[in-house]
Image (tube, helix red, strand yellow):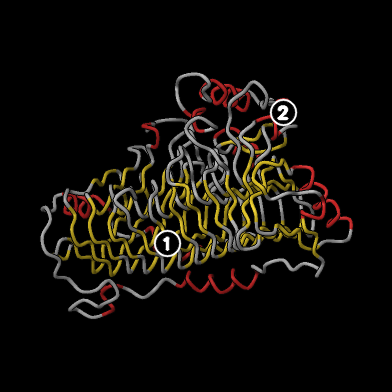
Amino acid sequence: MIESSPGHSRRRFLAAAAGGLLATGVAGRAGPAAASGPSAAGSSASGPSASGAEPAAWARVAVIKRRIRPPRFPRRTFPVTGHGAVGDGTTMCTDAFRQAVAACAAAGGGRVLVPAGTYLTGAIHLADNVELHLEAGATIAFSRDPADYLPVVHTRYEGVELMNYSPFIYAIDRTNVAITGSGVIDGQADATHWWDWSGDPPPSERPDKDLLARLAEEGVPVAERVFGTGHHLRPNLIQLYRCRNVLIEGVTVKDSPMWNIHPVQCTNVTVREVTVDSPHGPNNDGLDPESCVDVLIERCEFNTGDDCVAIKAGKNADGRRVNAPSANVLVDSCVMRDGNGGVTIGSETTGGVRWVFAWNCTMSSARLERAVRIKTNPERGGYVRDVYFKDITVGQAADAVVEVALNYENKSTGPYYPDVGAIDIRGLRAGRAPRAFNLIGNPANPIKGVRVTNSVFEEMAEADVVSDVTGFELRNVWVNGHRV
């Protein structure tokens, strides 16, 4: 069940002083200087009360965590090698994986074991009560032939449902599914396989993206939005769709055609100690929980070609049709390196995103564009609210440390203004970046409430951008050695 916010707390938050005066002062700051302020966790000269107590909303984290329980599986093991798989990197093992999963499910569940070796395969479809486990030294290497991901399946492409190539590891409407171990899941995408579909020269996904958007706007049933053969919409590496009780733990994933790990409309999801090493591909997001409820992401490491963690909720007309939010998402003690954003919400926000908590995360790279990022536009609609960050360390970022942009894709007008606000950041310490804040609302629809407390931005080279924001509060915030 999605919990609702106590109305009086939200009203107090949004009743903060209008952001115009604060924005004017912040945007006019001088350039870099040696930092001399307190630590991000320290108190100001006027005492701790000047920065305010931690929001009561953080008490929700323990409640959410109690609901999130990884699935457990029977002590039965089904090695893929017992069904004909050969770990030589050249023998196709698609049938062996299919048979092992079927045998495991028929027995009532257990572990499908991938021993050390490199196993070339097409799509792997999981079943109820099945744990796919990769031993140390095991690699699942996915075929580069699109035909190995047919027939088409019900999936979601950038927030819109359709029938398309199967994600490489896929499950739909399943209970108790897991991907675990210390091995590698390798999508094997590169500049001449899958990634080339993202460009303008043929083959290109652009005509198919436009077609899919038109079909969704016209309300064409999902079963009739058939892509796959002859089309160029890239599949995800791992997508678990409408599943309950999900665990992804320990594995390394790399080089997906696009998004690496994509749970959709799932409940009770744990992603723990996973490494995503996919810094080169287009749209190579690390982990995108979309329209999911009760999600724990902990002790993971991301090095990606797009957003590291991106919380989503469907897009435009199709997002309004499905109308499924993301809620109760916890991001704990993760490391973010390359990427467009460290912890991101959007741009697919149509179903709404609420109660996001991120803490004890470390983010730093010359190619990490932003640390905290919220992006949407007036075609999306939906809402983003009750978002809480604390104790975030940012070594360096290539753009703004904190960005909230309601003009994503340079669209600042439209029929569906998103409701974005109630964003609380505290204990953030950033070393070097062009600017601390890039906050861009819409003239007809401002960002409604951003509070930053007990935070330090040490070497910011440029003035902030703050426009169309109400309720922008800075409490005990230091930039370039000056309290602002």
Q: Nearer the viewer, residue 371 or 275?
A: 275
Give the image quarter of residue 181. Answer: bottom right
| Vertical arrangement, residue 145 with respect to residue 93, above or below | above
Mark 1 and 2 residues: CB-CB less than 8 Å, in contact? no
> Tag 1: residue type?
Val
User: Residue farthest to the front?
Assistant: 88
Position of residue 412 measured from the top left corner of the image (x, y, whole percent): 37, 33
- Distance (Cα) linking label 1 and label 2: 40 Å
Q: Residue at x 34, y 42 (%)?
A: 441
Label 2, residues with CA under 10 Å away: few <14, some 14-19, many ≥20: few
What residue sits right under mark 1 in the picture? 335
Task: Look at 38% across and 58% down and name the residue there.
Answer: 14
In the image, is residue 26 above or below residue 357? above
Q: Three-letter amino acid code at disc 2?
A: Pro
Judge from the rendering whether residue 341 lies leftward or rightward of residue 162; answer left or right.
left
202 or 216, nearer to the observer: 202
Q: What x and y, as percent, mark residue 106? A: 89, 55
**Mark seen at residue 221:** 2
